[in-house]
Amino acid sequence: MRHCSVQVRGLLTRDELDRYNALIEVGHFLEAEKRYDHVAVVQKEIDILILPAIERLKEKSRQRDRDTEEYLARKAQMEAELAAALRDDEDED
């Protein structure tokens, strides 16, 4: 059985996590019984189950990118204003 990443598991809802853990347990049992034909079916169900959490992780990443872009734009604006203010001070002298 392939586990999903810790980041994805952290974004599963309680119901999704309970179902994920149950499916993993069933998959491990089937592997112990060498029922690999059924393991593939369980793994597919797990892959489908974690898709919403993967989307939530992607959205968090996109939001972080937007926040970084906004921060850098504000920083550039503040630096430009500071440079303009310093030029004005120099011009007054």
Image (cartoon, rainbow, N blue to C red):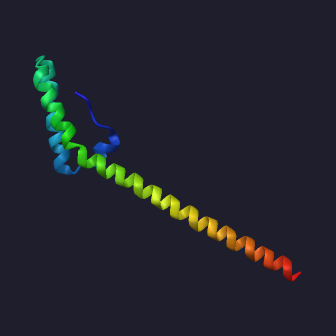
Q: Residue 32, how many percent across, how many down?
A: 14, 19
Res 48 → quadrant: top left
Name the residue at the top extreme: 34
Name the residue at the right extreme: 93
Depicted 59 relative to depicted 70: above or below: above
Tally of numbered tags: 0
Res 43 → quadrant: top left
Question: In this orientation, which residue lies closer to the viewer: 92 or 22?
Answer: 92
In percent of the image, x 18 and y 47: which residue is there? Answer: 16
Q: Residue 63, how many percent across, how many down?
A: 41, 58
Q: Residue 21, how many percent across, how many down?
A: 18, 38
User: In the drawing, does residue 55 fall left or right of residue 27?
Assistant: right
Q: Residue 74, how many percent across, how many down?
A: 58, 68
Name the residue at the bottom extreme: 92
Q: Locate the N terminus by quadrant.
A: top left
Depicted 63 relative to depicted 45: above or below: below
Q: From this viewpoint, is residue 61 visible?
A: yes
In percent of the image, x 20 and y 44: which residue is there? Answer: 17
Question: In this orientation, which residue lies closer to the viewer: 50 or 11?
Answer: 50
Depicted 70 relative to depicted 53: above or below: below
Q: Locate the C terminus by quadrant.
A: bottom right
In percent of the image, x 54 and y 63: which residue is there? Answer: 71
User: In the drawing, does residue 5 fall left or right of residue 64?
Assistant: left
Q: From this viewpoint, is residue 24 visible?
A: no
In percent of the image, x 26 and y 29: which residue is there? Answer: 2
